[in-house]
Image (tube, rainbow, N blue to C red):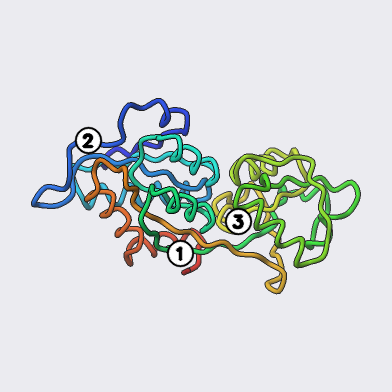
């Protein structure tokens, strides 16, 4: 299997360039690209990257995962990157408005779910329990897509939830639950699925739940535009959608 590199945001910022090898060769795409992607896409995009590289020998896809809002800041500051996959249209719109992308395409949708430790020490069985005194809750920061979606859920349900911690992204929020540091966290359903037996999921009723749409776009600063577009096309393809569906994402 061709190696797949998963880079952190700090490593990405320190890199001197995002791609090499030029545009696609006559026989197909080649070279390297860096993909900035929302933290909730970590598992599925690593799988997509491996499959893409196997289908396109001579290519390397490097990922940097984080909160979509933080990735937008990186792009604005000139971090070398070729593709952006956001967990919200709002953050993608900011990138397009700045001229860093010309357009975007929605490729997935996600909904919220409550995650609790397997032993459920807070005895959380429904959404309203998150507002009970003594129940400790972790949320994403308000400017992060998963935090904004959680706020919509609470507004829809007409409840007030006071978190004991607000994390930088959904993976950090889920980690608080997995480590037993809080009684519950509000994350995406895909994160609960990916966590397996380390957490227990509690569904949020559809009439008060909130969703977020994920758009993807090649960046105008890409040094390998052909490969960047090829990766975007792969995410949108039937093969790409199959991976996302298996991870719990819905069609946009």
Few, some or many C-alpha atoms within 10 Å of disc 3 (few <14, some 14-19, many ≥20)? many
Q: Position of residue 129 (x, y in %)?
A: 84, 58
Q: Quadrant of the N terminus?
A: top left
Per the model, the C-alpha gap separating discs 1 and 2 is 32 Å
Q: Is residue 223 left or right of residue 10?
A: left
Which residue corresponds to the image point at 46% horizontal and 62% vertical from the top-left? Answer: 246
Describe the element under mark 2 as helix, strand or loop.
loop
- Identify the residue shown where x is 42% and y is 43%: 36
The spot of residue 111 in percent (x, y) is 60, 63
In the rendered image, the residue lying farthest to the front is: 98
Q: SS for tag 1? A: helix
Q: Which residue is mark 3?
A: 188
Left or right: residue 54 compared with residue 235: left
Left or right of residue 204, residue 98 in this image: left
Q: Which residue is mark 2?
A: 20
Image location (x, y in percent) of residue 115: 69, 53
Count of labels in the image: 3
Disc on the earlier residue, 1 or 2: 2
Looking at this view, is 117 or 148 the one in front?
148
Q: Looking at the image, do the residues carrying marks 1 and 2 touch, with CB atoms under 8 Å apart?
A: no
* Image: 36 above or below 235: above
Q: On residue 245, which mark appears?
A: 1
Q: Are marks 1 and 3 in contact (CB under 8 Å)?
A: no
């Amino acid at each position: 299997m061709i190696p797949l590199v998963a880079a952190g945001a700090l490593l990405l910022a320190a890199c001197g360039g995002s791609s090499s090898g030029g545009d696609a060769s006559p026989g197909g795409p080649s070279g390297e690209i860096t993909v900035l992607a929302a933290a909730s896409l970590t598992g599925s995009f690593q799988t997509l990257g491996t499959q893409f590289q196997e289908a396109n020998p001579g290519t390397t896809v490097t990922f940097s995962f984080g909160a979509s809002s933080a990735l937008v800041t990186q792009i604005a500051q000139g971090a070398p990157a070729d593709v952006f996959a956001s967990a919200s249209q709002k953050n993608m719109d900011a990138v397009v408005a700045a001229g860093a992308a010309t357009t975007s395409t929605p490729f997935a949708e996600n909904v919220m779910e409550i995650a609790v430790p397997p032993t459920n020490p807070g005895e959380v069985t429904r959404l309203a329990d998150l507002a009970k005194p003594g129940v400790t809750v972790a949320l994403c920061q308000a400017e992060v897509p998963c935090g904004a979606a959680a706020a919509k859920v609470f507004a829809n349900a007409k409840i007030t939830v006071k978190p004991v911690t607000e994390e930088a992204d959904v993976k950090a929020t889920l980690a608080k639950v997995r480590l037993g540091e809080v009684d519950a966290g509000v994350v995406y359903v895909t994160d609960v699925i990916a966590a397996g037996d380390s957490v227990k999921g509690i569904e949020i009723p559809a009439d008060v739940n909130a969703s977020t749409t994920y758009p993807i776009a090649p960046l105008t600063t890409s040094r390998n535009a052909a490969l960047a577009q090829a990766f975007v096309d792969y995410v949108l393809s039937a093969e790409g959608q199959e991976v996302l569906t298996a991870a719990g994402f819905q069609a946009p």
